[in-house]
Image (cartoon, helix red, strand yellow):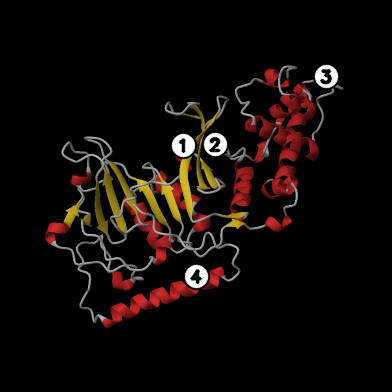
């Protein structure tokens, strides 16, 4: 499908950009209202079922044609679709993004350490230092008095420890043991930062909360406060571009952890599962939620729906687009995100969803490399046949036509 153009992402340098786009948006809406006022109700949309809303009550982004009986497709639960393409008008208002993307507090960033301090604030570091020193004091009684590497830590050393871990990640040295990292054949930078024995001791004593006040029912409690503060800093420091993605990531880890998961299809197989929302252009992580089992979702709704709504809080009402895979995507989610959150979505959808018409499912009779479309209000459903007896089904609230890109530019 040809992506409808999001306006405004490449005009961040224009100081009057937001005012111009808002004026264009208001003119577009007034033109559509005038057109419907002149029709005197002659071209009203016929209401087929509870799934098709009366467009006269909302901002009419395109004119629905009356659906004929032979153009109606229904899912197993009776959800109605039309095989007819809606009439084309101007760029729908749901695809106009007026928020300028980019770093929000870039003026204070002069050196690398300034960028670091925006995400890891002094408050976060002081919490880590305080609780780590509490653990050092508890474990210090196990060692002989005067042991050189057993002493309280400070701000400089904690920053050095975190920097060392960052370097190990950037160099992809996670497969190395501590002995290999600090050996004479290993990278010299690790030995320049701190001794191996002090590194092991600090990792063993590293703490992020007060043990006495910990919520024993919350598996994520030992690091929850630090995590939430860090994610809040990530969110408020950056405004994403028009397109974001939501997906899961398995962080390889084989140590002791109450919410460690096993995913056989992943390279690491064991680790901590984190669901992230990232800017698709810069890969910046805007928000993230760890998967901790049943306690991940405090509400009664499904876990995928909760995660999408929670992760996208910072961009609600901005008309941005979210791309996701079939674990998250559903018709109720697509409708709710557009109607109450002002966000469009594009994503694959599982074949067992009851809103999907039977004709969209895999069939031996479907020609290879062909697409079938269906429309319902502002929803567009596509079934693509990549191979014989296979179908990839996608749903979009961003698109409203049957155009197909013959050539894809990456």
Mark 1 lies on a secondary structure that is: helix
Residue, disc 4? 21
- 82 relative position to 19: left or right: left
Estimate how packed mark 4 is, as few (under 14), some (14 to 19) or many (20 or more) residues with alpha carbons within 10 Å: some
Q: Quadrant of the C terminus?
A: top left
Q: Would residue 236 be found to the left or right of residue 145 on screen?
A: left
Comparing 167 with 121, the one in front is: 167
**Number of residue marks:** 4
Question: Which residue is at the front of the view, 267 or 101?
Answer: 101
Reading the image, the residue beneath label 2 is 219
Q: Disc 3 designates what residue?
A: 144
10 Å neighbourhood of mark 3: few (<14), some, or many (≥20)?
few
- Separation of residues labelled 4 and 3 (CA atoms): 70 Å
- Across and down, in percent, residue 21 comes to 49, 70
* Tags 2 and 1 touching, CB below 8 Å: yes
x, y percentage for residue 207?
Answer: 68, 35
């Amino acid at each position: 499908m040809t992506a409808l153009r999001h306006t405004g992402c490449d005009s961040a340098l224009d100081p009057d950009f937001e005012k111009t786009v808002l004026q264009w948006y208001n003119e577009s809406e007034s033109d559509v209202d005038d057109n419907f006022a002149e029709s005197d109700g002659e071209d009203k949309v016929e209401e087929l079922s509870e799934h098709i809303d009366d467009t006269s009550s909302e901002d009419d982004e395109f004119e629905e044609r009356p659906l004929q009986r032979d153009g109606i497709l229904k899912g197993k639960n009776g959800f109605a679709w039309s095989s007819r393409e809606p009439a084309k008008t101007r760029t729908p208002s749901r695809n106009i993004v007026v928020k300028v993307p980019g770093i929000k507090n870039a003026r204070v960033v002069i050196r690398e350490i300034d960028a670091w301090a925006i995400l890891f604030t002094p408050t976060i570091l002081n919490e880590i230092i305080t609780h780590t020193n509490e653990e050092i004091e508890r474990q210090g009684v196990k060692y002989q008095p005067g042991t050189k590497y057993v002493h309280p830590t400070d701000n400089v050393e904690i920053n050095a420890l975190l920097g060392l871990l960052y370097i190990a990640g950037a160099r992809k040295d996670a497969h190395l043991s501590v002995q290999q990292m600090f050996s004479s054949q290993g990278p010299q930078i690790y030995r320049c930062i701190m001794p191996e024995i002090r590194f092991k001791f600090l990792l063993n004593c590293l703490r992020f909360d007060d043990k006495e006040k910990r919520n024993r029912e919350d598996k994520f409690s030992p690091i929850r406060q630090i995590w939430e503060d860090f994610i809040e800093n990530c969110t408020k420091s950056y405004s994403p571009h028009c397109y974001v993605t939501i997906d899961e990531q398995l962080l390889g880890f084989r140590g002791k952890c109450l919410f460690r998961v096993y995913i056989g299809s992943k390279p690491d197989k064991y680790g901590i599962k984190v669901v992230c929302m990232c800017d698709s252009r810069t890969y910046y992580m805007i928000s993230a939620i760890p998967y901790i089992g049943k306690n991940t979702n405090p509400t009664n709704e499904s876990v995928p729906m909760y995660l999408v709504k929670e992760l996208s809080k910072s961009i609600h009402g901005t008309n941005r687009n979210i791309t996701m895979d079939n674990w998250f995507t559903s018709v109720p989610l697509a409708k709710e995100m557009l109607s109450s959150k002002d966000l469009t979505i594009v994503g694959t959808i599982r074949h067992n969803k009851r809103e999907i018409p039977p004709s969209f499912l895999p069939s031996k009779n479907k020609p290879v490399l062909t697409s079938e479309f269906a429309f319902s209000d502002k929803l567009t459903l596509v079934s693509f046949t990549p191979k014989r007896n296979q179908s990839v089904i996608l749903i979009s609230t961003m698109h409203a036509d049957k155009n197909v890109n013959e050539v894809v530019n990456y």
